[in-house]
Image: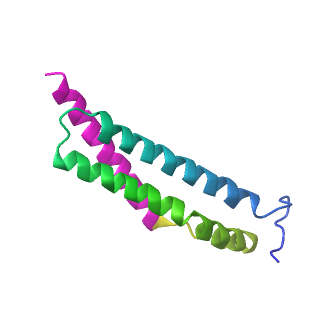
């Protein structure tokens, strides 16, 4: 049983909100990747690779959400929570890659 932090009756609430935000972000990322793969005209191998990479990244975030929630919920009560830097870095790289490909597609489709 984890102890409650002063002023915080349930130490599991903050990790739960964070986990839900991660899952929403992953779902949005997967939706955008599926839309790009489906509706971008003349999709290239690079675009397909980045789309599959985005879907795989979103899947990793969703699949690991429960274990990250359990770890952070336990650590939150003790005040020693460690953010998942590897997942954050991978998700940030995926979003930057999708944004870059989106800009390239927008600029080349108009020609």
**Which of the 4 quarters of the picture holds residue 86?**
bottom left
Q: In this picture, is 90 found above or below 40?
A: below
For residue 104, side relative to residue 17 (left or right) = left
Q: Residue at x 25, y 41 (%)?
A: 101
Magenta residue check for 102: yes
**As rendered, which of 81 and 54 lies closer to the eye?**
54
For residue 110, side relative to residue 15 (left or right) = left
Q: Residue at x 75, y 58 (%)?
A: 13
- Please state the horizontal and vertical placement of residue 50, each as a whole percent of the image: 28, 51
The range drawn in magenta is: 86-111
**Which of the 4 quarters of the picture holds residue 44?**
top left
Q: Residue at x 68, y 53 (%)?
A: 17
Q: Residue furthest left?
A: 111
**As rendered, which of 102 and 79 lies closer to the eye?**
102
Q: Residue furthest front?
A: 38
- Please state the horizontal and vertical placement of residue 53, each as a whole percent of the image: 32, 56
- Please state the horizontal and vertical placement of residue 72, each as a whole percent of the image: 65, 69
For residue 44, side relative to residue 79 (left or right) = left
- Please state the horizontal and vertical placement of residue 43, each as a whole percent of the image: 20, 40
For residue 63, side relative to residue 38 (left or right) = right
């Amino acid at each position: 049983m984890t102890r409650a932090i002063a002023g915080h009756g349930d130490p599991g609430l903050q990790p739960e909100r964070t986990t839900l935000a991660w899952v929403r972000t992953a779902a949005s990322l997967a939706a955008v990747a599926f839309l790009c793969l489906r509706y971008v005209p003349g999709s290239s191998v690079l675009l397909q690779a980045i789309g599959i990479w985005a879907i795989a990244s979103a899947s990793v975030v969703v699949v690991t959400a429960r274990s990250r929630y359990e770890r952070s919920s336990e650590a939150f009560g003790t005040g020693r929570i460690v953010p998942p830097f590897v997942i954050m870095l991978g998700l940030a790289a995926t979003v930057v890659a999708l944004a870059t490909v989106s800009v390239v597609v927008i600029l080349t489709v108009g020609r």
